[in-house]
Amino acid sequence: MSGPILQLRDVSLSFRGIKALNALSFEVACGEICALIGPNGAGKSSLLNIINGVYRADSGSVTFNGEQFIRIRPAHAAHLGVGRTFQHNALFRHLSVLDNVLAGLIRHSRTTLVEHAFGIGRDRRETREFNRWADEIIGFLDLTGHRDTVVGTLPYGVQKRVDLARALVGRPSLLLLDEPMAGMNQDEKSEMSRLILGTNARLGTTIVLIEHDMSVVMGLSHHVVVLDYGRKVGDGSPEQVRKNPDVIAAYLGTAH
Amino acid sequence: MSAIGTETIEGFGPSGVTAQSTRDRLRAGSVGVLLAALASIPLVANDYWLNAVLIPFLIMSLTALGLNLLMGYAGQASLGSGGFMSVGAYATYNLLLRLPELPLPVSLLLGGIISGLVGVVAGLPSLRIKGFYLVASTLATQFLLEWLFNQYGWFSNYSTSSSISAPRLAFLGHDLSSPAGRYLLTLATVVVVTAVAARLVRSQTGRTWMAIRDMDTAASVIGIPVSAGKLKAFFVSSLVIGIAGALWAFAYLGTVDARSFNLDRSFQIMFAIIIGGMGSIRGNFLGAAFMIFLPIQLDHLGSGVFGGAVDPGQLENFQKALFGALIVWFLIKEPRGLAALLSRAWTQLVSRINR
Ligand SMILES: Nc1ncnc2c1ncn2[C@@H]1O[C@H](COP(=O)(O)OP(=O)(O)O)[C@@H](O)[C@H]1O
Ligand SMILES: [Mg+2]
């Protein structure tokens, strides 16, 4: 694992006076799986939103691949290689699984409106290529049976995998997963863990994920960052974090 | 799984490919038969049918298609369609008048492009506002355009009456001013534009529009340029509606009359896509057929069955109430319109036959 792909320095964010993030700093090494844990409302989702530009930090900076940003637009972040899934369903619900995944390839598209309208130029080749990439990801995430189904009609657990497929197909270098296993049963969770590990190992994707299930976190991650009320209360290997008394007090000890 | 981006092809069984291509060939075949039938209609239909039914039906389908690209696919509601029709009509009129050496299709396309560019300007507020507020801003566009064409005589070549006569329609030496000629001009335009639109909505552009419609924050997070996507939708939509406006003036009315591009027209087009089916290409034709044929049928009913005993004003009010009720019904019960109703009925029929 080489140097950091992502560095956050003194990032603060507040909503109408309520501090969601308070001078937060940490680093994510290239190629690692980093888990963000902490009770509900700790600011985990807000943090992901700052990394890919959905929210703008009040102060502090985000450095991605050596480039420092005060403010980045979500579409720009995607073009730089930041992929993202959502805590709450954010799929294109009237589109099929295939079309959702194809939409995730936009950042690789080099074709224009006119080429699309008349099927000329690079359009046919790109369409063929995109379909192949999409089908590979669909196969990788065991979605082949649902390929042409409208996503709005699929079960929740499957939709979560479609969300992952849509993010993954663009081949991000940094993938942000917001509670990818929320609402899943044990079998679905271990299947999802396997897919996340596979993505990290085979594609070398750096992953930042938010997860509540400690056994999942301990089994999956190389690095754990613990948030509580917008502050960092723990940062280290899973073992270090498990032993940290502040973390136990803030999170591990309390029911949630 | 193989690494992403390598040359393997997965997920397509050989049987899947054959079924797909058979279906495609069947579909292409039936479209071909349909087109041949439509093109030979002038051989059997009388002028009344061409002038009063088929030509307006085709043009209404085209305007519905234009609005559907914007509203049904990209999710941006607009009440400016009448205005964009008038831009297309006046622009094409001036091109025919001032650059008579241009072939008719080129003038039509340029008129459409001018309307498309006006559409882009009218679409700028969509980068900031949504829903009801966007509808209000397109309404302002509609009124502004109506005022513009009334106010400035240059657009209508300083004609003194409120309607101006259309220049002669001709292409490759053929006079197209007969009912059959105007019908074929309209049909050819509708076929070409529909084919392009059908391709477009299945392309990455169409997917971009539907992604923006379904969830715009997620769209921008996965890298979709949301603002550019919206403006492209306004451009293509207004281009199509502009071409339809020019046809309305020259192939249907025979004059450019600003009054036929008023807010009522905008509403009529919106109703056509709500009834026909938003986000469906077929729905535009179903909705347009509904909007054109129902009033004709009601007229027949009024004069035929009741022997003219029903006052035409009453009949018109009844028609409005009927449309209103239908629209509420469709919005609540079947937001995807007649197109969805028909395709469901078709699936049921097929499964019953197969059983
Ligand atoms: N868009 C928003 N508007 C107002 N408050 C918000 C918004 N997003 C998050 N918050 C607040 O910020 C805090 C952190 O929320 P969040 O980042 O969603 O926490 P977590 O994902 O750790 O559960 C909460 O108090 C939440 O209410
Ligand atoms: Mg959250």
Image: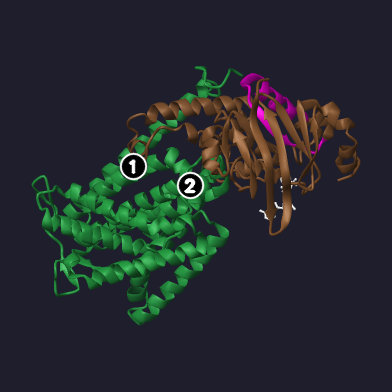
Chain rendered brown:
A
> Mark 1 — residue?
B195
Q: Name the residue under label 2.
A: B226
Ligand 2 location (quadrant): top right
Amino acid type for the residue under numbered disc 2: Val
Local packing at callout 2 (Cα closer than 10 Å; few below 14, some 14-19, many 20+) is: many
Q: Secondary structure under badge 1?
A: helix
Magenta-span inclusion, residue A201: yes
Name the image quarter holding the N terminus of chain A: top right
In the image, the segment drawn in magenta is: A190-213
Q: Is residue A237 visible?
A: yes
- Answer above or below: position of B4 versus A60: above
Residue B194, horizontal then vertical, whole percent: 34, 46
Would you identify the image quadrant in which residue B83 lies?
bottom left
Relative depth, front residue between B81 and A178 = A178
Could you say where residue B60 lies in the image, as x and y percent from the top left? 33, 58
Number of the label disc, if any, that sits on residue A218: none
| Colour assignment, chain B | green
Q: Does the magenta stretch include residue B27?
A: no
